[in-house]
Image: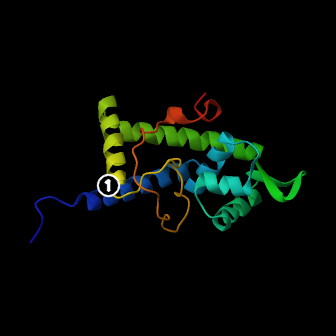
Amino acid sequence: MRPAEAPVGLQLTRVARVVSRAFDQALAAAGGSLPMWLILLNLKINPQANQRGLAAAVGVREATLTHHLNAMEKDGLLTRRRDPGNRRIHIIEPSAAGDALFLRLREAAMQFDQRLRHDLKKADVEQLASLLARLADNVGGSDDAPLWAGLADARPPAATQSPRSRPARTASDLPPHAQRS
């Protein structure tokens, strides 16, 4: 017997897949990818981040981050150097090419967000954020990690802490240097 309504989880999964693919395409058209965007964004938020801190901020395992950093360094998008105070730590900084890619990806991300918000009122966006937070709470998946944590990692996210409410995050939650100028 068919349910009268499609299960919410299936609807959410389908929409998430469609939106994710479209966002990947928008970033690719700007010359990048989701992992590149998340790494460069977090380097803007935390300049001169070390590799361990960057992995935590992006929400990936260090091995996964190393794979992405190797490719980005090879492409001239960032540099890694040893911390003079602790030779075991690598300091990661975007290059001029990485900064230019960040600006293109930021513009692509902002245009994509505008595309998603097309025909939505501010109240609609606020309600959507509230409903998504409630869905996450319902399955015990809310936490205080950045919205992008774990998106660049291919493995399923680890179990999260107990559910708790949090306010919806917006682009204005980014530090000023990572926001549009």
Q: Which residue is drawn at 57% across and 36% down?
A: 174
Where does label 1 land, which residue?
138
Q: Residue at x 76, y 53 (%)?
A: 76
What is the residue that sits farthest to the top in this orientation? 181
92 or 139: nearer the viewer: 139
Say if residue 143 shows up in the picture: yes
Helix, strand, or loop for circle 1? helix
110 vs 11: above or below = above
Judge from the rendering whether residue 107 lies leftward or rightward of residue 1; answer left or right. right
178 or 142: nearer the viewer: 142
Residue 63 percent across, percent down from the top left: 67, 68
Say if residue 32 shows up in the picture: no
Residue 40 percent across, percent down from the top left: 65, 47
51 vs 108: above or below = below
Residue type (three-letter) at the residue carrying disc 1: Asn
Residue 180 percent across, percent down from the top left: 58, 31
Q: Which residue is drawn at 46% across and 39% down?
A: 169
Q: Where, by quadrant of the figure, is residue 100 drawn?
A: top right
Q: Dividing the image into 4 quarters, which one contains the N terminus?
A: bottom left
Q: How many tags in the picture?
A: 1
Q: Dividing the image into 4 quarters, which one contains the C terminus?
A: top right
Judge from the rendering whether residue 85 lies leftward or rightward of residue 116; answer left or right. right
Judge from the rendering whether residue 31 lies leftward or rightward of residue 110; answer left or right. right
Q: Which residue is drawn at 59% across and 61% down?
A: 60
State how the image is colored. rainbow
Label 1: how many Cα within 10 Å (few below 14, some 14–19, many 20+): few
What is the residue that sits farthest to the bottom in this orientation? 1
